[in-house]
Amino acid sequence: MHMADALLSPVTGGAFWIASGALIGYSAKKITEEHDVMKTPLMGVLGAFVFAAQMINFSIPGTGSSGHLGGGLLLTVLLGPYRAFITLASVLIIQCLFFADGGLLALGCNIFNLAFFPAFIAYPFIYRIIAGNAPTPGKLAAGSMMAATAGLLMGAFFVVFETLVSGITELPFSTFVLFMLPVHLAIGIIEGLVTWGVLAFVARTDPALLVPAKSSVRPRFTFALFAVLALLVGSVVSWFASSQPDGLEWSIKKVTGSAEFSPAGNPVHEALAAFQQKMAFLPDYGFKSAPESLANPESPVNAGTSLSGIVGTLSVLAVAGTAGLLLGRKRNEPKHL
């Protein structure tokens, strides 16, 4: 559900850059006011895991489309909304700059759509109400499923809304909604199942992570496990991702007849596209010009994908982890009168 720049006007894209930037600043401020020494160090490793998981597109049976995890609710349950927002923003920024996944103008929209709704709407108003502070297995399942699905559907709806206010007449609002919401409902159900599975595992191994209370226990096992899984999924499992168009591309194709939607550009779009092309050294999670010796259509092994998975997970680990460390250090600094 990563939007391309072609779906947005410069005014709409700029407005959501401001909105997402303000939410990042607000989240950073709130983290410095909290006293949770356990969850902040997890920002890097959980962000790396979500980056790797987002590389795995899974097919949606009977549609000819695919989807990938958003990871917003999973991060929010484990980290809290403020750390989750900054962590997912780090993932999306690295995807955009290093891998040209999502447009540069659309970056603010992508952060808002994928991070705001699970962190600040679905988590407090759906998950917490259902699961409570000490979730039973049944409440954990219901809360995960309903909140993950709702968060993804709200983000999908806002994609359509953003094209509407951008004046993209090639994608009529009502028709676009009729395709976007059903396919993202299917993706949301799968996201809910995966979120539930991961949280159920954490409930057995590090249950303190599911309790929104202060704790001094450091979840070393969970930290190490998610770090290993991130590298494994990003470098190997990603070979087997579906090649079918994702839910957004599929919906655009159903409305316009082509997944390659490219209305007449303007100087802002062209300048940002040129900058992104220079920045992205592994576009579309592969080499810019892959050597013929590495190409083997009969094998799923892809060196470019593996390198992208490793570089991406380590980059998110560094960026989100550093953000967590800096915010934690700022929290502990004495106040001067």
Image: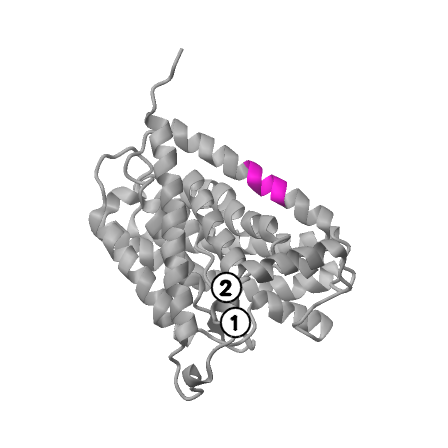
Where 27 falls versus 77 (above or below)?
A: above
**What element does badge 1 sit on?**
loop
Q: Are marks 1 and 2 in contact (CB under 8 Å)?
A: yes
Q: Which residue is mark 1?
A: 288
Here the colouring is one colour
Q: Amino acid at mark 1?
A: Lys
What residue is rendered at 56% in x and 76% in y?
Answer: 63
* Residue 266 seen anywhere in this rendered image of the structure: yes
Quadrant occupied by the N terminus: bottom right
Where 93 falls versus 63 (above or below)?
A: above
Residues shaded magenta: 17-22
Which disc number belongs to residue 39? none
Most distant residue in the top direction: 337
Q: Amino acid at mark 2?
A: Phe
Which disc number belongs to residue 281? 2
Local crowd size for mark 2, using a 10 Å CA cut-off: few (<14), some (14–19), many (≥20): some
Q: Is residue 18 magenta?
A: yes
**Residue 317 as seen in the image, left or right of residue 124:** left
Quadrant occupied by the C terminus: top left
